[in-house]
Amino acid sequence: HNSKSPLRTKSLSNRLIYLVLNAHIHVEKAAKMVFFFKSRCGNYTIYMGKDQYENDDLIKYGLDTDVWFHVDDLSSAHVYLRLKPNEMMDDITGECLLECATLCKANSIQGCKMKEVTIIYTRWKNLKKTA
């Protein structure tokens, strides 16, 4: 990704490098809704689409305060971190980045079997549905 791209990869030191993940997270599902969680990294809500239809709903109904996470170049769950009003992407803690990235990796058919994956993320408003 070029330096002007809104997509980012991030390490805990805020440099453009890979997040290397190996973790498991307990997941719950509400009836007829996408997965959602209260984060472990503060008082945030995290949303996750488990299939194309839930991912499409998340893209369609996202908010400007949402940050989208995905495994780069692989099929994976779409994970959204809902920021608090007036928070910026640079305010996301390393712990929250790791939590969201871990959900993406764990919910990627190929990525969950790999030792390392690259996680990309951007504001929801930067997403464009292409097909």
Image: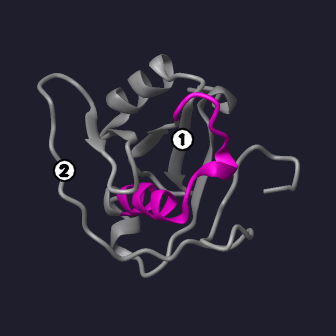
Quadrant occupied by the N terminus: bottom right
Task: Give the residue at mark 2.
Answer: 27
| Dot 1 or dot 2, earlier in sequence | 2
What is the span of residues highlighted in magenta in the rendered image? 84-105
Q: Position of residue 112 (x, y in %)?
A: 34, 68
Q: Position of residue 19 (x, y in %)?
A: 55, 71
Q: Categorize mark 1 by other alpha carbons within 10 Å: few (<14), some (14-19), many (20+).
A: many
Task: Give the residue at mark 1.
Answer: 68
Outermost residue on the top side: it is 61
Q: Is residue 32 above or below residue 113?
A: above
Taking the spot 69% from the left edge, 51% from the top edge, the residue there is: 90
Q: Amino acid at mark 1?
A: Trp
Taking the spot 40% from the left edge, 50% from the top edge, the residue there is: 42
Quadrant occupied by the C terminus: top right
Looking at the picture, tell me which residue is in the foreground, 82 or 49: 82
Q: Main secondary structure of the magenta part?
A: helix
Looking at the picture, tell me which residue is in the foreground, 84 or 62: 84
Looking at the picture, tell me which residue is in the foreground, 34 or 51: 34
